[in-house]
Image (spheres, grey):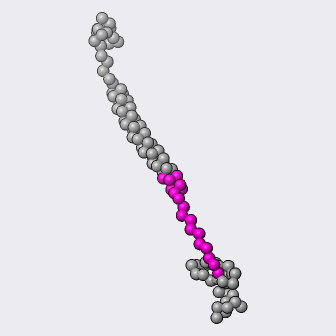
């Protein structure tokens, strides 16, 4: 038998210390912190997964084949052909043509 500070006798094997209010509060706070840490870790994993998905989608997009079309144009009187606004003007601007369509 042992004696505690209050002078009461107790057996060392059967003595169970009851948690105090501070211990209960600390335990509750630790549980909340644990749940919060789990939530933040899951959020981090989701953001990390989305980041990798974005990079993967970008790499996939830039690796798509590009369609290149070549157009060969022939013109009369060896003038250059220019396409301006979708119209063929035979290498002459509107200011170089008179009313009949001839060069000035």
Percent x, y of residue 57: 48, 53
Residue at 47% x, 44% y: name it. Answer: 48
The image quadrant of residue 103 is: bottom right
Residue at 64% x, 91% y: name it. Answer: 101
Magenta span main SS: loop
Percent x, y of residue 47: 45, 46
Whether 48 is drawn above or below 83: the answer is above
Task: Check the picture and name the quadrant holding the N terminus.
Answer: top left
- Per the image, is 58 magenta? yes
Closer to us: 85 or 13 = 85
Q: Is residue 10 left or right of residue 94?
A: left
Whether 27 is drawn above or below 83: the answer is above
Residue 28, visible in the rendered structure: yes
Whether 7 is drawn above or below 60: the answer is above
Region in magenta? 57-75
Whether 9 is drawn above or below 99: the answer is above
């Amino acid at each position: 038998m042992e004696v505690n500070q209050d002078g009461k006798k107790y057996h060392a094997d059967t003595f169970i210390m009851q948690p105090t209010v501070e211990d209960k509060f600390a335990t509750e706070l630790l549980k909340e912190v644990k749940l919060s840490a789990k939530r933040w870790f899951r959020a981090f994993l989701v953001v990390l997964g989305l980041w990798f998905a974005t990079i993967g989608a970008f790499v996939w997009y830039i690796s798509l084949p590009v369609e290149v079309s070549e157009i060969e144009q022939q013109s009369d009187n060896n003038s250059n052909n220019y396409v301006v606004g979708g119209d063929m003007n035979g290498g002459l601007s509107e200011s170089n043509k008179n009313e009949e369509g001839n060069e000035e």
